[in-house]
Image (cartoon, helix red, strand yellow):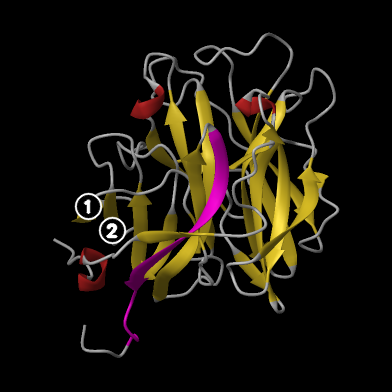
């Protein structure tokens, strides 16, 4: 059995307030992306909407920071599609990959072709591309790139959502959550789809789901494998996980709490490294007085140097 890296057993997870994208009584900000650094600035994308608007009717905004604590909201990055399009109801849950000088914004969306129903409206994953993190973003013509299963018996026959992409062995590993109409929102599970290019085509792993827990996805390259933070859904709720092969996850540690929507700062995500250095911070969502907003999380999930004794 593959050994779990010892540093994953003591995550020391905690959170602190941010300025600029923190609590705002007029807005909801949630589901932040991973954090990337370009030049001297950190970038993050997130779902935003006015208070009282349906969560799925949101659009995607972004912010920048020089230190990871004080952020500047830079405005909308991606809008919903035209009426009747697959992404016309709203665009949510962003994730951004920086690959070979290009940027890829993955997002989830639903159509306004019929009234939205939590257990009836299909949700798909698409991607937009840009040459700069500020955009402009161009949606891929052949979107969506990942859709719910056509087999009603599959766990992801209602929705695919919450993309996290990492590069492994020259391929693009897209982790996502899925749910069927027969499962509750807190019974989502993680799946995996793999492609040769960041825009696909993506092929779902035949052994999905790879983890039977997690309402939002948070993964990163860790040593030779993949680490994960699991939030509040399923039997593996509030845990750190590790998969030496990126597929067969095992519990490394249990925590008292993990926020929903953790987006790590992970400089190794797209490096196709043979030894991932792990993570030590990121951003996530918090709720107060019925409003959702962004906070910072810190943790101690860094791997030792590859030539270290561990």
Identify the residue shown where x is 68% and y is 39%: 48
In the rendered image, the quadrant that contains the C terminus is: bottom left
Whether residue 278 appears in magenta in the rendering, the answer is no
Please tell me whether residue 89 is drawn above or below residue 291 in the rendered image: above
- How many other residues sit within 10 Å of disc 2, few (<14), some (14-19) or many (≥20)? many
Tell me the SS state at disc 2.
strand
Q: Is residue 144 visible?
A: no
Which residue is tagged 1? 250
Q: Nearer the viewer, residue 89 or 297?
A: 297
Query: Magenta residues, as a range?
Result: 291-306
Which residue is tagged 2? 242
Identify the residue shown where x is 34% and y is 69%: 301
Image quadrant assignment for residue 6: bottom left
- State the CA–CA distance, disc 1 to disc 2: 5 Å
Residue 3 pos. (x, y %): 17, 67
Residue 272 pos. (x, y %): 51, 70
Identify the residue shown where x is 31% and y is 38%: 213
- How many other residues sit within 10 Å of disc 1, few (<14), some (14-19) or many (≥20)? some
């Amino acid at each position: 059995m593959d050994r779990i890296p010892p540093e994953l057993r003591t995550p020391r997870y905690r959170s602190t307030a941010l300025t600029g994208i923190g609590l705002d009584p007029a807005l909801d900000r949630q589901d932040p992306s991973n954090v990337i650094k370009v030049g001297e600035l950190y970038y993050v994308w997130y779902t935003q909407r006015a208070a009282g608007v349906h969560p799925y009717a949101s659009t995607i905004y972004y912010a920048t920071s020089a230190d990871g604590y004080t952020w500047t909201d830079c405005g909308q990055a991606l809008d919903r599609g035209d009426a009747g399009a697959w992404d016309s109801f709203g665009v949510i849950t962003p994730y951004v990959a920086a690959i070979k000088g290009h940027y890829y914004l993955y997002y989830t969306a639903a159509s306004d072709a019929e009234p939205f129903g939590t257990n009836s409206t299909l949700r798909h994953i698409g991607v937009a591309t840009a040459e700069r993190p500020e955009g402009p973003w161009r949606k891929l013509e052949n979107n969506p790139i990942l859709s719910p299963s056509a087999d009603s018996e599959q766990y992801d026959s209602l929705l695919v959502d919450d993309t996290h992409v990492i590069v492994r062995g020259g391929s693009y590993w897209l982790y996502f959550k899925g749910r069927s109409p027969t499962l509750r929102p807190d019974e989502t599970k993680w799946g995996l789809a793999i492609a040769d290019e960041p825009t696909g085509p993506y092929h779902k792993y035949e052994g999905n789901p790879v983890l039977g827990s997690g309402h939002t996805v948070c993964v990163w390259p860790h040593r030779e494998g993949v680490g994960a933070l699991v939030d509040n859904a399923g039997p593996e709720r509030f845990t750190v996980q590790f998969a030496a092969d990126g597929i067969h996850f095992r519990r490394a540690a249990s925590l008292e709490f993990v926020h929903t929507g953790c987006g790590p700062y992970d400089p190794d995500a797209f490096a196709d490294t043979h030894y991932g250095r792990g993570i030590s911070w990121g951003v996530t969502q918090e709720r107060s007085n019925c409003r959702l907003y962004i906070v910072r999380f810190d943790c101690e999930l860094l791997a030792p140097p590859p030539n270290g004794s561990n």
